Amino acid sequence: MLTGVKRIKGLGVFGNFAAPSDLPPFARYNIIYGENGSGKTTLSRLFAVLDTGTHPEFAGLEYALDSQLGALTQGQPYDRKVRVFNADYVQANIGQFQGPLRHILIIGEENKALAEEAATEKALYDERTRAITAAQAAAAKLDADKGKIFSAIAKTIGEATSGSTLRSYRKPDAEKAFGKVQAFATLDEASLEAHRATIHQEQLDAVTEPELPLPPPKSDAPFAAFAEVTEALPAQVAALLARTAQAGALRRLVEEPEVARWVEEGVAIHGQHGWDRCEFCDQPLPAERMARLAQHFGIEDQRLKADIESARRTVLALGEGLAVLALPVRTALYGELRIEFDAACETVERCRSALAAEMDAVLELLDEKLLHRATAYERDIALDPAPLTAAITTVSAIVARHNAKTAGFERARSEARKAIELHYLSTIVDQVREHERQIAGQQALFMRLTDGAVDLPDPRGLAVLKGSYEAKQAKVSSEHAGGAALTERLKTFLGRTDLHFKSGTDGYHVQRRGRPAKRLSEGEKTAIAFLYFIVQLGDQDFDLAEGIVVIDDPISSMDAASIYQAFSFLKNAVRDARQVFVLTHNFDFLKLLLNWVSHFRKADKSLYMVICTESGASRDAVLKPLDPLLRDHPTEYCYLFKLLHDFESDGTIVASYHIPNIARKVLETFLEFQRPHERTLYAQLEAVNFDPHKKTAIYKFANDLSHFTGKGFDPALVAETQKNVAYLLEMVQAVAPEHYESLKKLGSAA
């Protein structure tokens, strides 16, 4: 049983309702009063959604109800069945009476055992259906959770492979790629960063590799490759050191290399100019001395000197080659190659410096030999180009890798993307596999429950089970009994026999004197719809003793006599229900309901009213305890007088809009007792002794503004309402002062 309402949001005029502190809890019998348009039918829709927890027309519906079984919120089906009679029910089940009514299956007494079997099978079917729904929901949730895993990893992959938060890589891409992976593998951090760097890089130009041999020296003949020439030099220099020109050598010049060089240069200068006097001492050059010097600086000696100088030029050329050896700029290479490139370049520079130092030492040996050509000797010669050439080869290999990447840049970037994609997909393998395992389990459960299995309490499949209980229901039910019950009740309800229900294979047809009924009155339509609902409460799909019945305005468009019949049928139909909610706008019907529940225990009844107020562009309904004036007095008149007496305009049309209707009801009731012999409202008002100008204003206000005009809102409504409500109350007080004071006192006490 429902015990109370806490909150309703997003349900029509119940935009954001929170129950007030003085709202009594729901009881077994609940009476709810409200004017037309106040929100009664909207409230009845709340009860109608409890079976599923949702309403197709109110996607944002939120509610919180209390029940004996616990709290109820949106999206949560209620365990008890709820039957609701309202405008939606009439439209869904009766419509415009253009077709047959659905059969109502009523169980015969003689087939109770078979009915119980059908009920047991249906309960098992319902339980199996709920379990199937739960398995489907669980599988759907697991699949959605798996999708979230792919969405998250797709975002990571997208950002890692594009370098941008504007991703083109999404969940379907990740799922498709995951399905194609043959072997999962993750990357170490260094490899991952290298691939990221490749993706984020711009394509660079190719770089020229450092080449050997170097350009030849400025001499009369080129030399071979740098390494080959350098490797041959130690032997050449050693051979030069071992050569000498001893014939005709002058001891002093041999012993004094510096003097020998000075003398040699002087002889050459004098010879070039043809001088026969010494430029140093200005003495004639002795012929004998000149002959001895010519012998000392002979042909062999000049050949040795030329060979030494040639070797020097080779060494100098090699040195120049070392000096101009150009290595690429590190920024011209891709970032992932630069650390390795820097190390290789350091090795090149170290080897170049070492080799340059060795060449300087060789030059010193050759310079020394130029001064000691007459002496043969040996020296240790260290000149190894291998470390330098190896280091340059290493640099060239790095440059070659750079150039290869440039040549296949898009391919390298694509491979990097694939490697990163595989890495991140590999990190979710365990999660995805676990979700797939659980989904498979739920799907297997779904198949077992749907197709049946030997280990189930009932091994039959769902379709077989449904066919079995429906066949038993067909045996124990009489669709004709429903039609007969409707006809009998309609006869009693209307007090005539011209309308009846004929049962056919497609349902019940409403007939009038044996022919299809046409042009049914609104009262007849309401009566048929309400009786159909009452008879349906006894069908095999609804257990009245455990169900909740909600009835909204069953007496719409009925005359006074039919109202009593409707009340009688209602009272007897819901007598055994677990819980009842009746909503009405009709005061006479309300009094019948109040009189009915007046003898119940206080704990078994609760009385409410729905009030709708307007502010700005919104209309908001609230559920409140029933006004004591409506509860304790036999007529609506007392309550409406209180509304007029307490009316205070806030200056808006919205606040004044409903007042003319209330004023007309109060005026009609008051004048009916004052001047019952007059036939029209105008005549009754004219017969009252009161200011004629004010009477005219009252009549125009109550008569014109209480009816639809088609002219739209009248801006004068606010001022007219303030003025004429005061006139009307003044007239009641003037004509019947004791009556006025009694009504005023009654309203104050309430």
Image: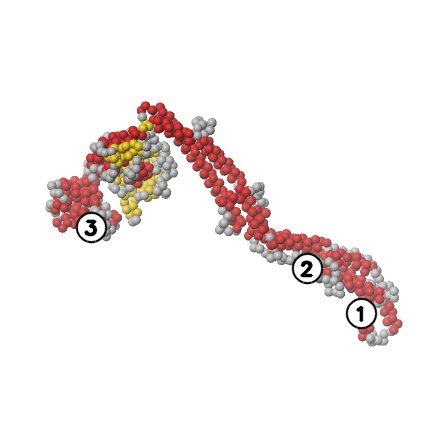
- In the image, residue 379 above or below residue 740: below
Query: Is there a contact, CB below 8 Å, between mark 1 and mark 2?
Result: no
User: Residue 313 sits in which quadrant?
Assistant: bottom right
SS assignment at label 2: loop
Q: Nearer the viewer, mark 1 or mark 3?
A: 3
| Horizontal and vertical percent position of residue 611 | 27, 42
The one nearer the camera, 570 or 250, is 570
SS assignment at label 1: helix
The numbered mark at residue 720 is 3
Q: Residue type at mark 2: give it.
A: Leu
Q: Give the mark, 3 or 2, whose residue is nearer the N terminus.
A: 2
Disc 1/disc 3 C-alpha distance (Å): 139 Å
Q: Give the mark, 1 or 3, whose residue is nearer the N terminus.
A: 1
Q: Residue at x 21, y 46 (%)?
A: 706
The one nearer the camera, 178 or 505, is 505
Q: Quadrant of the C terminus?
A: top left
The numbered mark at residue 265 is 1
The one nearer the camera, 90 or 588, is 90
- Res. 206 visible in picture: yes
The numbered mark at residue 325 is 2
Q: Residue type at mark 1: give it.
A: Glu
Q: Residue at x 76, y 59 (%)?
A: 362
Q: Residue at x 45, y 27 (%)?
A: 459
Q: Sort mark 3 into few (<14), some (14-19) or many (20+) by Cα contacts within 10 Å.
A: some
